[in-house]
Image: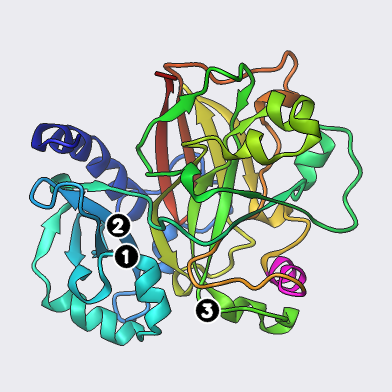
Amino acid sequence: MTTIASIAVRSSRLSSAIVGAFGGKSTSWIHPQAVSSRRFISNSTVKAMRFVQFRTAATGEKQRLGVLSEDGTQVSDISDRYEGDLITLIRSGVSLDEVKASAAKAAPLKMDSVELLAPVTNPQKILCVGLNYSGHCEEQNKPIPKEPMFFSKYATTIVGPHDDVIAHKISDQIDWEVELAVIIGKKAKSVAKANAMDYVFGYTVAQDISARDWQKQRNGGQFLIGKSMDTFCPLGPAAVHKSLVKDPHQLAIKCSVNGVEKQNGSTSELIFRIDDIIARVTESITLLPGDVILTGTPAGVGMHRKPAEFLKPGDVIDSEIEGLGKIKNKVVADS
């Protein structure tokens, strides 16, 4: 049960991370040639939107929806009109001008008084793409795929940007995979590749946690259980509107475990780009507002290290994407 004390402790821990990710100096791991995330922030545009879902000591377990300030130190609560839910906002078709007007009227809350939740909760679909980075194929000695490999995760995998990941008792091969997540903005069916990006609402950081034994050796070779255990999809810290991201295919992406870098790549390595993924999927599957697409992971996962490395209780996973922010998740024992 959430208490005022627990929210205060967690909020103080993540407040500095939010400021650093959205309003502070560029993180040191960003490649020198990469552009600082500040380039994608404009004080003059109403489209500079970062949406967060959160709760406070005053609201208890009730989920709220807010818009982050430019420097990431405050959040404007716009919950009343949109039921505290980003998917409700997306489905409403409201313009960003209206959202900004609502945010301007709201009394801002300081980030150290809120606890961030996942920016999207209970999407109808979480669609994932395997083997979608060239480096991830190379580390497995696998050829570049000729068509994407799709699988799914359940919505019960979703946890917030600073929530715990459970090391489930039934697995001893739990692995990390930092990924760029795409949030769908409107119903998409039989979408042409040329128009596919029109159906994107925004982006966030994801961890596609995987139980490799269940993914590769058990369950008849089907991915579902290995990918869909509870807490296996941390998301956050915010849903960054697409207008803030100049090119989602040119973002530095990184993962570290206990402060040791494990993955450091770029979304430029994507084999099947976002427009291609959306076009292919919607040939047969309808995407709905709020659906999430995990686009794949770069090289450096634990399973393909020599020797193999897997997560254990007490480990801390840091996942970061240029311009989108950083999430930090602790691995805890299965109780």
Q: Quadrant of the N terminus?
A: top left
The numbered mark at residue 186 is 3
The residue located at (66%, 78%) in the rendering is 196
Can the viewer see residue 48?
no
* Image x and y of residue 285, in percent: 70, 70
Point out residue 206 in the picture as x, y percentages from the top left corner. 51, 47
The residue indicated by pointer 2 is 53
Q: Are marks 1 and 2 in contact (CB under 8 Å)?
A: yes
Mark 3 or mark 2: name the one nearer the start of the chain: 2
Residue 85 - label: 1
Q: Dot 2: within a 10 Å radius of its alpha carbon, few (fewer than 14), some, or many (20 or more) residues?
A: many
Q: Is residue 247 shown above or below 146?
A: below
Magenta-tinted stretch = 275-283
The question of residue 276 being in magenta is answered with yes
Query: Considering only vertical position in the picture, is 236 above or below 75?
Result: above
Q: Main secondary structure of the magenta part?
A: helix
Residue in the foreground of this view, choosing between 81 and 315: 81
Q: Residue at x 48, y 67 (%)?
A: 290
Callout 3 crowding tier (Cα within 10 Å): few <14, some 14–19, many ≥20: some
**Residue flagged by tag 1: what amino acid is it?**
Asp
Q: Is residue 85 magenta?
A: no
Q: What's the CA distance linking mark 3 and mark 2? A: 20 Å
Q: Are marks 1 and 3 in contact (CB under 8 Å)?
A: no
Residue kind at label 2, given as amino acid type: Gln
Q: Name which residue lies at 21% across and 71% down.
A: 78
Q: CA distance from mark 1 to mark 3?
A: 16 Å
Residue type (three-letter) at the residue carrying disc 3 = Lys
Left or right: 4 with respect to 100? Answer: left
Query: Is residue 237 among the parts visible in the rendering?
Result: yes
Q: Position of residue 311 (x, y in %)?
A: 55, 20
